[in-house]
Image (spheres, coloured by chain):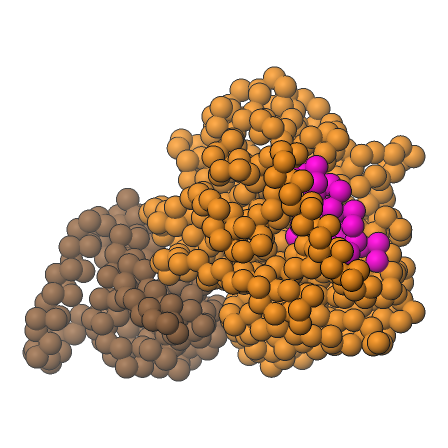
Chain colours: A orange, B brown
Amino acid sequence: MKALLRGALAGAMVVGLAAGAYASDDLVTMQKNAKEWVMPTGNYANWRYSTLDQINAGNVGKLQVAWTFSTGVLRGHEGGPLIIGNVMYVHTPFPNIVYALDLNDDNKILWKYEPKQDPDTIPVMCCDTVNRGVAYGDGKIFLYQADATLVALDAKTGKVDWSVSNGDPKIGETGTSAPMVVKDKVVVGISGGEFGVRGRLTAYDIKDGKMAWRAYSMGPDSDILMDPEKTTMLGKPVGKDSGLNTWEGDQWKIGGGTTWGWYSYDPELNLIYYGSGNPSTWNPSQRPGDNRWSMTIFARDADTGMAKWVYQMTPHDEWDYDGINEMVLADVTVDGKKHKALVHFDRNGFGYTLDRETGALLVAQKYDPKVNWATHVDMKTGRPQVVDKYSTDHNGEDVNTKGICPAALGTKDQQPSAYSPKTGLFYVPTNHVCMDYEPFRVAYTAGQPYVGATLSMYPPEGDKNMGNFIAWDASKGKIVWSLPERFSVWSGALATAGDVVFYGTLEGYLKAVDAKTGKELYKFKTPSGIIGNVTTYEHNGKQYIAVLSGVGGWAGIGLAAGLTDPNAGLGAVGGYAALANYTALGGQLTVFSLPN
Amino acid sequence: MIPGGFERYLRRVDAALFAAVAATAISAATVGPSAHAEDKPYKIEKDGTVDWSTFSGYRRYHSECHVCHGPDALGSSFAPALANSLKTMTYDQFIDVVVNGRKNVSASSDKVMPSFGTNRNVMCFINDIYAYLKARADGVLPRGRPKHEPKPKAAQEAEDACMG
């Protein structure tokens, strides 16, 4: 009866939306209901935190599998399910199936949507055919397909409401990221930094898919939606055509800066936050200049797309340190002053704390002590102080620059961190991998790879672990505790009010650790390596933990084929076994709960 | 490495392909093998040092092909292990598939090999890539990045000419 009532309420909410309120007004309310998980990031602030505490540090050791669901798809399963009312929405990598599962009726499939996509899209996806999840709003489920088509599905029936093409796979433009619903718009990015795609963020009208605004990462100010006087970096106006004059010739037209990560939104400031990716190509000698605004944190007006402030973390990238990782919005006190802050763990190995109203840089510290390509970030200019020895531009084309930490995978990739307002700590899944990087000359051909470097990756000298799961103090920029992991931790974390933090490992373990100490409290080996993000919800009075298994992604492509093989000649010192010895491909959702 | 511009090079590949297909009956003994059609298009010293062409193939393979065909030509669920395929695939078949692409799409399979015929990063170094893969297929080159001889001047000149 209770469940029925809740179902009716959820239905009423959908009707309410149709009456004309902003979808995001509703989402702001819905994200506070811990029983549901209404957006991939948990909430607009990207916390991945739940106030549910039925499962807690005292009893999580008794966790057991409640039910499972095979997605029927191999390859890398990133992201995680949404739970809206009594329905769970599960997505898959290419072919991008969406399943609606009825939590009230034995988790049976209410509807299944499978788009018809040209398989020619597959070879233009750089790092596996991943998809990071669907979005909900206005009674619709938004699926952003591999072929860069954005589809609005009726959340009740799975029928297509509208569909729009956000890019052309023939020139290497693809979709991997999860859309985000903001007000009356759906925001989507673009993938293809390894194909010379020019990155942009695009907002579509939630009702009919009509484009509202599109903001490029580089090019003329009018393309970037940037005001040379009003848009600032570290408090100073960016000046005219910064996205042109920091490039040589027309290189900006194939400049990368793609937007395939996570987006967050501050409803009070009405700003959308996200980061842009690497400048194309990976050979820095072919693109002199700072290459603005690749590798940049953007704060944009949600209505117009206009950039309020920007901060370029890695000018003139030489290592493929995309800046696309999530922006976590939280109140952080730095030097005694409380800020509406933005916390970001960049691929480049620095954990940044910025004031999210002004874009002022507050903290920039290494979140892996092995990071060596820069000594520190100059807090006045915001520029990392690059070490010549590790500069692939300084060393030049056809030279193998060795021992750079982190590797191109970054100290962290897209796998999102979690923030607990209860402990005030950030929980960060990290990579602990270094590399050799040899850039070389490449030519651009539309729709063909545009990479221009070859890499070898291995753990830092003297270490055996290729990952760490850390707790981070963003006000000081310090690691609080760090748990070594055999492989990169490529799974998104979840923090809960039960003082438990969850994450998955590439071998396939779901782990629960104590939020204060990091002590391991529970682990269970799922059928395949986990690169998905852990989710929680409540149904019929019971708390559940859900996670997608299915090894793959960039980590899976490299590691599954044995980059850690001691015989591979990649600098590893023995004692490493390939990931292939621990797990195999296969998509499955595993849902956990406490015993009855 | 092929001297001359890329366009000229493409024509040469077409011509070579056509000749190969039209005249498979003419054995190597009749016309003499070209460098790429040799049994062993690579040179590997006892200490594992490879010639520039083989190394160049390693580099280009790992920026153009390995996303689907796997690191060290070991394959993935998208595409076959070329360290295997080249045990039986001839040079001419190899060129044909790289230039024209290939599709194997069915209910259970979505295998698509794009055409790389206009991609200089592949076509300017196609014989290098072949040499590298052949060495892998012959089991004489271990996994990972090989040591290599310095880049010869001729290789640099050919690269400059072909890449335009």
In depth, the one of B77 and A93 nearer the eye is A93
- Name the quadrant containing residue A167: top left
Left or right: residue A284 compared with residue A61: left
Left or right: residue B71 compared with residue B90: right
- The residue that appears at 42% across and 77% down in the rendered structure is B141
The image shows residue B141, relative to residue A189, as above or below, that is below
The image shows residue B40, relative to residue A7, as above or below, that is below
Q: Quadrant of the C terminus of chain B?
A: top left
In depth, the one of A75 and B89 nearer the eye is A75
Image x and y of residue B76, in percent:
45, 72
Range of residues picked out in magenta? A23-52
Image x and y of residue B93, in percent:
22, 72
Residue A321 at least partly seen = no
In depth, the one of A329 and A166 nearer the eye is A166
The total number of labels drawn is 0
Q: Magenta part mainly helix, strand or loop?
A: loop
The image shows residue B86, relative to residue A336, as above or below, that is below
Left or right: residue B19 compared with residue A456: left
- The residue that appears at 37% across and 80% down in the rendered structure is B84
Image x and y of residue A248, in percent:
44, 32
- Name the quadrant containing residue A315: top right
The image shows residue B65, relative to residue A524, as above or below, that is above
Residue A554 falls within the magenta-colored stretch: no
- The residue that appears at 20% across and 54% down in the rendered structure is B9
Image x and y of residue B153, in percent:
32, 54
- Name the quadrant containing residue A575: bottom right
Left or right: residue A255 compared with residue A334: left
- The residue that appears at 46% across and 44% down in the rendered structure is A162
